[in-house]
Image (cartoon, rainbow, N blue to C red):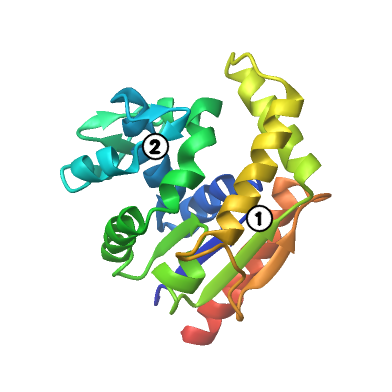
Amino acid sequence: MKKISIAIDGHSSTGKSTLARELARSLGYVYIDSGAMYRAVALFALENGLVDDTLDEAGLLEHLQALELDFKVNPETGRSEIHLNGKNVEKQIRTIEVSRYVSEVAAIPQVRTKLVALQQEMGAEKGVVMDGRDIGTVVLPGAELKLFMTAAPETRAARRYKELLERGETVSYAEVLKNVRHRDHLDSNREVSPLTQAADAIRLDNSDMGLKEQYERVRSYAERILKAKK
């Protein structure tokens, strides 16, 4: 059976990664979380003293080419997880502190150039599901199935707040909502590869939609395309 590429873009905290991971698992495809790559770079900046209220862009760029990013399957979870310079940082990149700086890091042209090249290399073969902000518009413009996921900011903040509390983080809903809106602004207004819906992408507003309904709907889109390719 022929394989396709699936690109999932959209706002933060819309559940893109959860949907993409389940879709990849069910199709037997490779899942690539592009957002985790930008988060890993932001984590590197935080851990190496390159953030003091503002991001030290020049300092980060000095280290950029030496950064090694890849995905490896965790034998305990069976999931593909991000590694930074050989270390699994899947948990560390999900904190609210990293979230504060990830959009700023992603707006740096040199960072995007490096990571987009890596993502395109990973997605060169068909049979991938990749999610992020510019997958359908920049990274995989030829993807056979493109989705753009969105939801009300308050809904996304509530989801993110619940997730952070479950991880044991001390954070307020107001802080999370502020972060969601700030990231929306940065993602949609950056000069390089801003968050936009590809002309041929299917818009999926999941404000009032459960994961099962989302998955079944998207799986049907994929099956329709695959059937046409037989």
- Give percent across and percent down for residue 178: 70, 35
Quarter that holds the N terminus = bottom left
In the image: residue 25, left or right of residue 152: left
Report if the CB atoms under discs 1 and 2 are less than 8 Å apart. Answer: no
- Give the numbered dot on residue 42: 2
Q: Eyeballing the image, is 14 above or below 122?
A: above
- Please give the name of the residue rendered at 53% of the width and 35% of the height, measured from the top-left corner: 99
- Give percent across and percent down for residue 207: 80, 50
**Mark 1 or mark 2: whose residue is earlier in sequence:** 2
- Please give the name of the residue rendered at 25% of the width and 46% of the height, measured from the top-left corner: 61
| Closest to the observer, 175 or 15 | 175
Q: CA distance from mark 1 to mark 2?
A: 30 Å
- Give the numbered dot on residue 205: none
- Please give the name of the residue rendered at 60% of the width and 45% of the height, measured from the top-left corner: 183
- Give the numbered dot on residue 215: 1
In the image: residue 43, left or right of residue 114: right
Q: What's the residue type where badge 1 is placed?
A: Tyr
Q: Eyeballing the image, is 186 above or below 116?
A: above
In the image: residue 27, left or right of residue 2: right
| Closest to the observer, 180 or 70 | 180
SS at circle 2? helix
In the image: residue 160, left or right of residue 102: right
Q: Residue furthest left?
A: 66
Using the rendered image of the protein, determine whether residue 68 is visible from the camera's viewpoint.
no
SS at circle 1? helix
- Please give the name of the residue rendered at 50% of the width and 48% of the height, measured from the top-left corner: 21
Using the rendered image of the protein, determine whether residue 60 is visible from the camera's viewpoint.
yes
Within 10 Å of disc 2 (Cα), the crowding (few <14, some 14-19, many 20+) is many
